[in-house]
Amino acid sequence: MAENINSLHVPQVGLPRVALYVTCLVDLFRPVVGFAAMKLLQEAGCEVSVPLTQTCCGQPAYNSGDRQAAQELAIEVIKNFESFDYVVAPSGSCAGMLKTHYPELLKDTDQYERAISFADKVFELTSFLVDKCGLQSVDRGFAGRITYHDACAGLRELNVKQQPRALLNSLRGLELSELSDGEACCGFGGMFCVKYPEISDAMVSKKCANIEAANTQMLLGGDMGCLMNMAGKLSRDGSSIEVRHVAEILAGMSDEPPIAGMKGPKQGKQK
Amino acid sequence: MNGFVKNIRRALGVTASDPERLEVVRKHLDDHARNLIPERALRSHPELVDNFIKMLESVEATVAHLSELADVASEVARYMIVNDLAHQLKCGADKLIGEIDWSEQSDLVIMSGPATGEDVLSLTHAFAGVSETGTLFVASGPENPVTLSFLPETNIVLIRVRDIVGSYEDAWLKLPWGTRGPQMPRTVNFISGPSRTADIEQTLITGAHGPCHLHVIVVG
Amino acid sequence: MKSTAGSFKENAQDALKNQRLQKSLKVLGRGFVEKRAKARAALPEFDELCQQGQAIKTHTLKHLDLYLEVYEKQLVASGGHLHLAHTAADACEQILQICRDKNARLITKGKSMVAEEIGLNDHLEEAGLRVLETDLGEYIIQLRNEPPSHIVAPAVHVGADQVEADFRRVHKELPAGRDLSDPAALVFEARNMLRSEFINADIGITGANFLIAQTGSSVIVTNEGNGDLTQSLAPVHIVITSIDKLVPTLNDTSTLVRVLARSATGQSITTYTTFSTGPRRSQDLDGPQEYHVVLLDNGRTEQLAGEFSEALRCIRCGACMNHCPVYQSIGGHAYGWVYPGPIGAVLTPSFLGLDEAADLPNASSLCGRCEQVCPMGIKLPDLMRKWREKHHQGGGLPVLVRSSLTAWVIVAKRPRLYQFMTGIVMPLLAKLAGCKRNFRWLPLATGWTNSRDLPAPSGKTFMSLLKKHQREGRL
C-alpha cells in the first residue's frame, strides 16, 4: 500500500535518482505542476521519486524570524531527501531555501555539514533540466505569444534566467516577449503580501501593467507564489491574460484551466 | 582617542599590542599597494590623452589641445571672445601660468590671488589629469588658491599633456612624496566637468554652485 | 532627527495615496536604475572593483582601532583638530561649542547624513545660530521643513512646481513676475541666493564620504561644488562624520571612488571629489584657518561587535533604495528616520530599537535586488531577516501572524496530519470557489483579497492524486 512506503517512484536501473520536492503551493493549489515536473524529469532520463513525507520547506517560518521552527522543518526535509542523487523543485523560491538558506539556517548546529552536502543536490526544475540533464529543447509545440516572469529567488539566488527561456524558445510556434523592468519583484514575498498588503498591491500593480504592456496571451513563471499573486491581480483587473507555471507548457499539460481562471487555453494552442 | 579605541578593541576582541595586527596595518600603509586598475587606464599615452579629452567632453567640459604653451594666451582670448566674457582673468602665482606670454593680449587684465564673488573667469593649473574618467587633479597652495576652482562662473584649467596619466593612483605620484605617501596640500580637488545638479526632478543642469563652464587647455 | 518609523504602516499608506510622490518615484525608478546599469556595463572591471572595495572595508573595520590611531596622528600632524563623540548629543554639543568659541552666527552646510542622524541643524538653531543648507536638494527640503527622503537625492520627492512655489514664498526680495518655469531657472536662482552666504559664513560644515588614515584627510564627493564653497570660504571648516568612513590609503580610496558614483548616480565619477587635509597652509591665500573633525560613534562600535557589522561597510551610495520595489512604491519619508530603503531597514532598528522600527525590516519581500546591486556586498535581506528573528524572539509578531504561523508549523511537522487536513480542506475550498476558481473575499485573507483575487485550489492535492494514480497503477 502506498501509505506504507516512504516514497512513490517507478524504479529504473542506472538512471539519476531524482526526488521531486513538489512544494506546498503546488501540492495544495496546482497539482498539475507536480505531474508536469515528473513528466519532464522522466523525459530527461531521470528516475523520479516523490517522498511522501514532504510538507513545507520552512520558508514562511524562516522569513518571519522563527528560526527554530525553520530549523526543525529543514532537518526533516534533509532527512527525507538526502538519500537521492538530486532534489528538484518546480520553484526557485523553495529550491533557494533548500540550497542557499538551509546551510545558513543550520550553520550553528551539528547538522551544518549535512546541510552543505544536501545543498549540492538541490536544483530548480528548469535549471536542472538544462544545466544538469543537458536538455536543450523540448519536442513539443505551443502556438502563442507568452511572457515570462523571473521570480526573485530563482533569479538572484540560483541564477535561473536563461534556462526556462531556452526550453520555451525550443517549443514550435512559441513567441516570447520580455517584460519591461523584468527583474522587479511582483510583490508576493510570502507573508509580506499579507503583512503589507497595500505596498504589495502597489508592486503587483506595476508588474501587471508591464505584463499587459508585453501584449501577450499568457504569463508563465516558475514559482506558484508569484504566479498566484499576479494571476489574482490580473483576474481582479478583468484581464484576459492566462497565468500558468512554465512546467505545464513545457510538458504539454495545459488542459487544466489557468491559475485563477475559468476556461482552458484561449489563445495558446498546445500541439 | 583612548576610550574610543578601547571600546573598539573590546568589540573586536583584540589587544593593542598584537604584533600580527600591527604588522598587517604597517605593511598595508607602507606598501602603497594598488588595487585593480581598470584596463582603460593602462593603455598607451596617446590613447590615454584621447580618452581624457573624450571623457571630459562627455561631462560638458570643453577642451582645446595646443601644441605650445605660447598658444595659450590666444586660446584664452579666443575663448573670451566666443563666450562674450569681459577681458579679465584671475589666476594664482602658478609657475606654469607664469610662463604664459600675454604680451599680444594687451587688453587683457590679469589679476592674481584668491577668487572673490566678482571674478567671472579663473585660470588654474592641474598637476595631473586622469584619463579613465577625464578628471583634473588641482592642488591648493599659494600659487593655486582653491577658490579659483569654485567661485568664478567660468574656470579654465591648464594641463600639460605629459601630466595626463591613466589612473588616480598614477596621478597621486605627481605630488611631492614622503615615506607614507604624497605630501598633501590643504585640498586636492578632483574636477570632472562643470558643476551640476539633478536635484530637481532628476533633470541634469550644469552650473549649480561651482563653475557653469569648464574649459580645459591641454598643452604639449 | 525625530522618528516616525513607529507609524510606518500609516506613512506607507499615505505615501501610496500621494499622487505627486508617486509621480516623482516613477522618475527615480527609471533614472537611477538605468544609469547604474549603463555605468556598470561601461566598466568591465566593475564587479571586481566592488569585491576589492568590500575587502578594503572589511580589512579596515577589522583593524579599525589601529587605523583610527594612524588617522588621528596624521590629522593632528597636518594641523587639524579631532573631536570624539560617543553619542549624537556629544557631537551636537562639540560642534555648538566650536561655533560659540568662534562667535559664529551663520553656518553654511554641505550635505551630511551623519548631521541628519544627530539632528545637528535643530541643535544649532535652538542655540540661535542660522544654519543654511547649501546642497540644492537639502536647501529645498530645508525651506520646506522636511527631512531628506533619499540619501543621495534628498529632494527626490519634490516636484519642480513645488520648488517654484517655495522659492516664491521665501525669496521675497526677488521680482514676483520672474520666470521660474524651468528647473534651470530654479537652479540659477538658488545659486544666486547662496553666493553671498558662502562668503559671509562664519563656519562651514561638511560631512565626509571617506577618512584616509594614511594622510589624515577627509573626502567629500559632490556634484554641485557647494561643499567646496562651504569648506573653502568660511574661516572654520568642521567635518561631521563617523568612524565607519575610515579607509587606509589613497589607493584604497581610489577603488571606492570608482564604484561609489557608478552605483549612486551612474556617473563614472562625480564632478568633484575633494581631499581636505588640515587647515590652510601658512602661505596659502585662501581656505579655512581651522579644520575640525567631529568623529561620531553613536552605536557603531557596538554594531562592530554584533551580527550587523557588515552594514558598516556601507558607503551610502543609495543603490539599494534606488532598486528597492518597496522604496520605489513608498519613497523615503515613510521609513520615518534618516536612512530609508533596505540599508535603513537594517540600520534604523540599531539606532532606535525594534519597538520603534520593527516594521522596517519586516516590510520587505526579500527580493534580493538590494543585495545584488550593493557595491559593498552587504547581505541586506539576511540582515533584515536577523532583525525579524529578534523581533520574533521578543514576541513582537502580531498575534494573528504568530498563531497562524505556529499552527502551520505544527501541521507541517506532521506529514500524515498535513496530508489528512489538506486532503480535506483543499477540495472543500475548490468547491467553495465554484466555477470562478478564485475568491474575491476570504476571511483572514482580506489583506490579499482587498486588492486581488485569491486563486482557488484545483481540487485534490498533489499527494492525494499521486496516491490515487499509484493505486490505479497509472504510475
Image (cartoon, coloured by chain):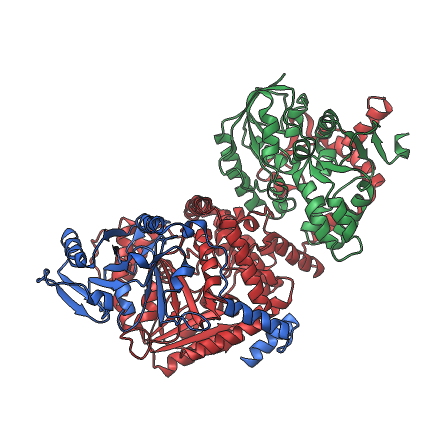
- Number of numbered labels in the structure image: 0
Image hue for chain B: blue
Residue that protrudes farthest toward the top in the picture: A271
Front residue of B193/C177: it is B193
Q: Residue at x 24, y 65 (%)?
A: B96
Toward which corner of the image does residue B137 lie, by quadrant?
bottom left
Query: Is residue C466 positioned above or below C167 on the image?
Result: above
For residue A70, above or below residue C231: above
Q: Nearer the viewer, residue B74 or C71?
A: B74
Q: Residue furthest front?
A: B44
| Residue C125 at x, y percent in the picture | 39, 73
Q: Chain C appears in which tint? A: red
Corner quadrant of residue B181: bottom left
Q: Which sits in the foreground, B102 or B185?
A: B102
Indicate the position of residue C418 as horizontal and vertical percent values.
81, 40
Left or right: where C171 falls relative to C74: left
Q: Residue C11: in sight, yes or no?
A: no
Q: What is the display colour for chain A?
A: green
Query: Which residue in the rendered view is the most extreme toward the left?
Result: B106
Residue A65 in the image: state x and y as whole percent: 69, 54
Q: Quadrant of the C terminus of chain A?
A: top right
Residue furthest to the bottom in view is C101
Q: Foreground residue, C282 or A122?
A: C282
Q: Is residue B38 left or right of residue A236?
A: left
- Can the viewer see residue B35 in this picture? yes
Q: Quadrant of the N terminus of chain A?
A: top right
In percent of width and height, residue C26 lies at 44, 44
